[in-house]
Image (cartoon, rainbow, N blue to C red):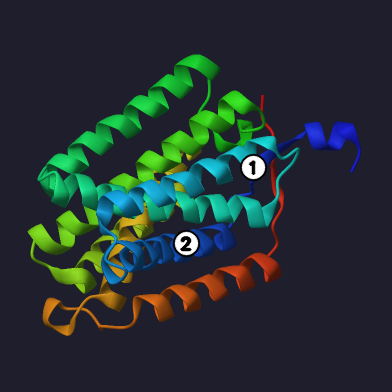
Amino acid sequence: MDTAERAALAKVPQVTLGFWLIKIAATTLGETAGDAVSMSMELGYLVGSALFALVFAAAVGAQIAARRFNPPLYWATIIATTTVGTTLADFVDRSLGVGYAGGSSILLGLLLASLLAWRRVLGSIAVETVADTRSEVFYWLTILFSQTLGTALGDWVADSAGIGYGGAALVFGALLLLVALLYRWTSISRTLLFWAAFVLTRPLGAVVGDFLDKPLAEGGLALSRYAASLVLLAFIVACVAVLPQRAARRVH
Protein backbone atom coordinates (compact mmCIF):
# COMPACT_ATOMS: atom_id res chain seq x y z
CA MET A 1 0.00 0.00 0.00
CA ASP A 2 1.51 3.32 -1.03
CA THR A 3 1.48 6.56 0.97
CA ALA A 4 -1.51 8.02 -0.89
CA GLU A 5 -3.61 4.90 -0.23
CA ARG A 6 -2.71 4.90 3.47
CA ALA A 7 -3.64 8.58 3.73
CA ALA A 8 -7.09 7.78 2.35
CA LEU A 9 -7.85 5.26 5.09
CA ALA A 10 -9.01 5.77 8.65
CA LYS A 11 -7.45 3.86 11.56
CA VAL A 12 -10.73 2.18 12.47
CA PRO A 13 -12.57 -0.67 10.71
CA GLN A 14 -15.43 -0.46 8.27
CA VAL A 15 -18.76 -0.81 10.05
CA THR A 16 -20.17 -4.13 8.86
CA LEU A 17 -22.27 -6.92 10.34
CA GLY A 18 -19.02 -8.59 11.35
CA PHE A 19 -18.00 -5.44 13.22
CA TRP A 20 -21.15 -5.56 15.32
CA LEU A 21 -20.79 -9.30 15.96
CA ILE A 22 -17.27 -8.85 17.31
CA LYS A 23 -18.28 -5.74 19.26
CA ILE A 24 -21.06 -7.58 21.12
CA ALA A 25 -18.75 -10.51 21.88
CA ALA A 26 -16.09 -8.06 23.13
CA THR A 27 -18.53 -6.30 25.44
CA THR A 28 -19.69 -9.65 26.82
CA LEU A 29 -16.05 -10.63 27.39
CA GLY A 30 -15.49 -7.32 29.17
CA GLU A 31 -18.21 -8.19 31.66
CA THR A 32 -17.03 -11.74 32.39
CA ALA A 33 -13.32 -10.81 32.47
CA GLY A 34 -13.96 -7.72 34.59
CA ASP A 35 -15.98 -9.74 37.09
CA ALA A 36 -13.34 -12.49 37.08
CA VAL A 37 -10.67 -10.03 38.20
CA SER A 38 -12.72 -7.95 40.64
CA MET A 39 -14.91 -10.74 42.10
CA SER A 40 -13.48 -14.20 41.43
CA MET A 41 -9.90 -13.08 42.17
CA GLU A 42 -11.29 -10.90 44.99
CA LEU A 43 -9.18 -7.90 43.99
CA GLY A 44 -12.12 -5.53 44.26
CA TYR A 45 -13.45 -2.92 41.87
CA LEU A 46 -10.83 -0.24 42.61
CA VAL A 47 -7.81 -2.47 42.08
CA GLY A 48 -9.45 -4.07 39.05
CA SER A 49 -10.14 -0.63 37.57
CA ALA A 50 -6.53 0.44 38.16
CA LEU A 51 -5.14 -2.68 36.48
CA PHE A 52 -7.43 -2.45 33.48
CA ALA A 53 -6.83 1.30 33.20
CA LEU A 54 -3.10 0.59 32.75
CA VAL A 55 -3.89 -1.96 30.05
CA PHE A 56 -6.26 0.54 28.40
CA ALA A 57 -3.67 3.32 28.44
CA ALA A 58 -1.01 1.03 26.93
CA ALA A 59 -3.41 -0.22 24.23
CA VAL A 60 -4.52 3.29 23.26
CA GLY A 61 -0.91 4.43 23.14
CA ALA A 62 -0.05 1.56 20.79
CA GLN A 63 -3.15 2.25 18.70
CA ILE A 64 -2.24 5.93 18.29
CA ALA A 65 1.38 5.07 17.49
CA ALA A 66 0.34 2.61 14.76
CA ARG A 67 0.64 4.03 11.25
CA ARG A 68 -2.50 2.34 9.95
CA PHE A 69 -5.46 0.19 10.97
CA ASN A 70 -4.31 -2.98 12.73
CA PRO A 71 -7.24 -5.37 13.41
CA PRO A 72 -5.77 -7.34 16.38
CA LEU A 73 -4.57 -4.13 18.04
CA TYR A 74 -7.86 -2.36 17.43
CA TRP A 75 -9.96 -5.14 18.98
CA ALA A 76 -7.54 -5.57 21.87
CA THR A 77 -8.08 -1.88 22.63
CA ILE A 78 -11.87 -2.31 22.41
CA ILE A 79 -11.65 -5.21 24.89
CA ALA A 80 -9.52 -3.04 27.17
CA THR A 81 -12.18 -0.30 27.15
CA THR A 82 -14.95 -2.74 27.99
CA THR A 83 -13.10 -4.44 30.86
CA VAL A 84 -12.11 -1.16 32.51
CA GLY A 85 -15.65 0.07 31.85
CA THR A 86 -17.05 -2.91 33.75
CA THR A 87 -14.96 -2.50 36.90
CA LEU A 88 -15.09 1.30 36.86
CA ALA A 89 -18.88 1.38 36.58
CA ASP A 90 -19.21 -1.18 39.38
CA PHE A 91 -16.85 0.87 41.55
CA VAL A 92 -18.84 4.07 41.03
CA ASP A 93 -22.27 2.43 41.34
CA ARG A 94 -21.58 0.06 44.23
CA SER A 95 -18.42 1.00 46.13
CA LEU A 96 -19.09 4.75 46.05
CA GLY A 97 -22.82 4.21 46.54
CA VAL A 98 -23.86 6.40 43.63
CA GLY A 99 -26.33 3.76 42.45
CA TYR A 100 -27.22 2.61 38.95
CA ALA A 101 -29.43 5.59 38.14
CA GLY A 102 -26.90 8.11 39.42
CA GLY A 103 -23.98 6.38 37.74
CA SER A 104 -25.83 6.10 34.43
CA SER A 105 -26.77 9.79 34.54
CA ILE A 106 -23.20 10.92 35.27
CA LEU A 107 -21.74 8.69 32.57
CA LEU A 108 -24.34 9.78 30.01
CA GLY A 109 -23.35 13.38 30.71
CA LEU A 110 -19.66 12.55 30.23
CA LEU A 111 -20.42 10.71 26.98
CA LEU A 112 -22.43 13.60 25.55
CA ALA A 113 -19.78 16.10 26.67
CA SER A 114 -17.09 14.08 24.91
CA LEU A 115 -19.09 13.90 21.67
CA LEU A 116 -19.91 17.62 21.77
CA ALA A 117 -16.28 18.58 22.45
CA TRP A 118 -15.12 16.31 19.64
CA ARG A 119 -17.64 17.86 17.25
CA ARG A 120 -16.71 21.39 18.29
CA VAL A 121 -12.95 20.91 18.02
CA LEU A 122 -12.71 18.76 14.88
CA GLY A 123 -16.01 19.45 13.12
CA SER A 124 -17.19 15.83 12.88
CA ILE A 125 -17.75 12.81 15.10
CA ALA A 126 -17.93 10.40 12.17
CA VAL A 127 -15.67 7.43 12.82
CA GLU A 128 -14.42 7.62 9.23
CA THR A 129 -12.50 10.78 10.22
CA VAL A 130 -10.43 8.95 12.86
CA ALA A 131 -6.96 9.07 11.35
CA ASP A 132 -4.82 11.40 13.49
CA THR A 133 -3.87 11.76 17.13
CA ARG A 134 -6.51 14.32 18.11
CA SER A 135 -9.39 12.41 16.56
CA GLU A 136 -8.14 9.14 18.06
CA VAL A 137 -7.97 10.64 21.55
CA PHE A 138 -11.58 11.81 21.26
CA TYR A 139 -12.59 8.46 19.74
CA TRP A 140 -11.15 6.31 22.51
CA LEU A 141 -12.28 8.65 25.29
CA THR A 142 -15.82 8.55 23.90
CA ILE A 143 -15.68 4.76 23.65
CA LEU A 144 -14.45 4.49 27.24
CA PHE A 145 -17.40 6.57 28.47
CA SER A 146 -19.84 4.56 26.34
CA GLN A 147 -18.53 1.23 27.62
CA THR A 148 -18.70 2.38 31.24
CA LEU A 149 -22.19 3.82 30.73
CA GLY A 150 -23.32 0.54 29.18
CA THR A 151 -22.31 -1.44 32.25
CA ALA A 152 -24.25 0.84 34.59
CA LEU A 153 -27.23 0.96 32.25
CA GLY A 154 -27.34 -2.82 31.90
CA ASP A 155 -27.27 -3.32 35.67
CA TRP A 156 -29.93 -0.65 36.14
CA VAL A 157 -32.36 -2.28 33.72
CA ALA A 158 -31.66 -5.88 34.81
CA ASP A 159 -31.57 -5.30 38.58
CA SER A 160 -33.39 -2.10 39.49
CA ALA A 161 -36.17 -2.59 36.94
CA GLY A 162 -36.50 -6.17 38.12
CA ILE A 163 -36.75 -7.80 34.70
CA GLY A 164 -33.64 -9.93 35.05
CA TYR A 165 -30.77 -10.55 32.67
CA GLY A 166 -32.84 -12.33 30.03
CA GLY A 167 -35.47 -9.59 30.03
CA ALA A 168 -32.83 -6.88 29.84
CA ALA A 169 -31.15 -8.66 26.91
CA LEU A 170 -34.48 -8.63 25.08
CA VAL A 171 -34.94 -4.90 25.80
CA PHE A 172 -31.52 -3.91 24.49
CA GLY A 173 -31.78 -6.33 21.58
CA ALA A 174 -35.10 -4.73 20.60
CA LEU A 175 -33.57 -1.25 20.82
CA LEU A 176 -30.71 -2.34 18.56
CA LEU A 177 -33.23 -3.75 16.10
CA LEU A 178 -35.02 -0.40 16.14
CA VAL A 179 -31.75 1.38 15.34
CA ALA A 180 -31.17 -1.05 12.45
CA LEU A 181 -34.66 -0.36 11.08
CA LEU A 182 -34.11 3.38 11.35
CA TYR A 183 -30.85 2.95 9.44
CA ARG A 184 -32.58 0.95 6.74
CA TRP A 185 -35.78 2.95 6.32
CA THR A 186 -35.04 6.54 7.34
CA SER A 187 -32.55 9.29 6.51
CA ILE A 188 -31.56 9.92 10.13
CA SER A 189 -27.86 10.77 10.49
CA ARG A 190 -25.78 7.60 10.03
CA THR A 191 -23.24 8.97 12.50
CA LEU A 192 -25.94 9.43 15.16
CA LEU A 193 -27.29 5.93 14.56
CA PHE A 194 -23.79 4.47 14.73
CA TRP A 195 -23.14 5.94 18.16
CA ALA A 196 -26.61 4.90 19.37
CA ALA A 197 -25.90 1.32 18.31
CA PHE A 198 -22.38 1.46 19.72
CA VAL A 199 -23.70 2.49 23.14
CA LEU A 200 -26.53 -0.08 23.12
CA THR A 201 -24.27 -3.04 22.31
CA ARG A 202 -22.48 -2.50 25.62
CA PRO A 203 -25.45 -3.03 28.00
CA LEU A 204 -26.52 -5.95 25.81
CA GLY A 205 -23.11 -7.56 26.27
CA ALA A 206 -23.14 -6.68 29.97
CA VAL A 207 -26.43 -8.43 30.72
CA VAL A 208 -25.50 -11.44 28.57
CA GLY A 209 -22.21 -11.70 30.47
CA ASP A 210 -24.04 -11.48 33.79
CA PHE A 211 -26.52 -14.10 32.61
CA LEU A 212 -23.63 -16.46 31.90
CA ASP A 213 -21.75 -16.12 35.18
CA LYS A 214 -24.16 -14.98 37.89
CA PRO A 215 -25.43 -17.56 40.43
CA LEU A 216 -28.57 -19.53 39.66
CA ALA A 217 -30.35 -17.83 42.57
CA GLU A 218 -29.77 -14.46 40.86
CA GLY A 219 -31.07 -15.61 37.48
CA GLY A 220 -27.75 -16.56 35.92
CA LEU A 221 -26.28 -19.81 34.64
CA ALA A 222 -23.45 -19.89 37.22
CA LEU A 223 -20.80 -20.65 34.58
CA SER A 224 -17.15 -20.16 35.40
CA ARG A 225 -16.09 -16.59 34.67
CA TYR A 226 -12.69 -17.83 33.57
CA ALA A 227 -14.09 -20.44 31.19
CA ALA A 228 -16.66 -18.04 29.74
CA SER A 229 -13.96 -15.41 29.19
CA LEU A 230 -11.65 -17.87 27.43
CA VAL A 231 -14.44 -19.10 25.14
CA LEU A 232 -15.44 -15.54 24.26
CA LEU A 233 -11.82 -14.55 23.64
CA ALA A 234 -11.31 -17.55 21.35
CA PHE A 235 -14.48 -16.61 19.46
CA ILE A 236 -13.28 -13.03 18.99
CA VAL A 237 -9.84 -14.15 17.80
CA ALA A 238 -11.48 -16.51 15.29
CA CYS A 239 -13.80 -13.76 14.02
CA VAL A 240 -10.95 -11.27 13.62
CA ALA A 241 -8.95 -13.88 11.71
CA VAL A 242 -11.78 -15.07 9.46
CA LEU A 243 -14.06 -12.08 8.88
CA PRO A 244 -12.94 -9.29 6.51
CA GLN A 245 -11.17 -6.54 8.46
CA ARG A 246 -10.69 -3.47 6.29
CA ALA A 247 -10.00 0.10 7.29
CA ALA A 248 -12.79 2.59 6.77
CA ARG A 249 -12.40 5.08 3.96
CA ARG A 250 -11.63 8.54 5.30
CA VAL A 251 -14.05 11.42 4.91
CA HIS A 252 -13.01 15.07 5.04
Secondary structure of the residue carrying tag 2 is helix
Residue type at the position of mark 1: Ala
Q: How crowded is mark 2: few (under 14 residues within 10 Å), some or many (20 or more)?
A: many
Instruction: Tell me the quadrant of the picture where the N terminus can be found.
Output: top right
Give coordinates of residue 61: x percent, y percent.
Answer: 60, 38
Q: Residue at x 23, y 52 (%)?
A: 90
Residue type at the position of mark 2: Ala
Give coordinates of residue 40: x percent, y percent.
Answer: 29, 71
Q: Residue at x 63, y 73 (%)?
A: 238
Residue 197 seen from this side: no
Instruction: Indicate left or right for 116 with 93 as reference.
Output: right
The answer to which image quadrant residue 35 occupies is bottom left
Give coordinates of residue 59: x percent, y percent.
Answer: 57, 46
In the figure, 141 relative to 239: above or below?
Answer: above
Give coordinates of residue 118: x percent, y percent.
Answer: 47, 23
Q: Residue at x 24, y 57 (%)?
A: 154
Q: Distance between the residues labelled 1 and 2?
A: 19 Å
Instruction: Indicate left or right for 25 with 132 as reference.
Output: left
The circle drawn on residue 26 is 2
Secondary structure of the residue carrying tag 1 is helix
Front residue (pair 181, 58)? 58
In the figure, 219 relative to 199: above or below?
Answer: below
Q: Residue at x 67, y 32 (%)?
A: 131
Q: Residues within 10 Å of mark 1 (few under 14, many from 20)?
A: some
Look at mark 1 in the image and give the residue it sits on.
62
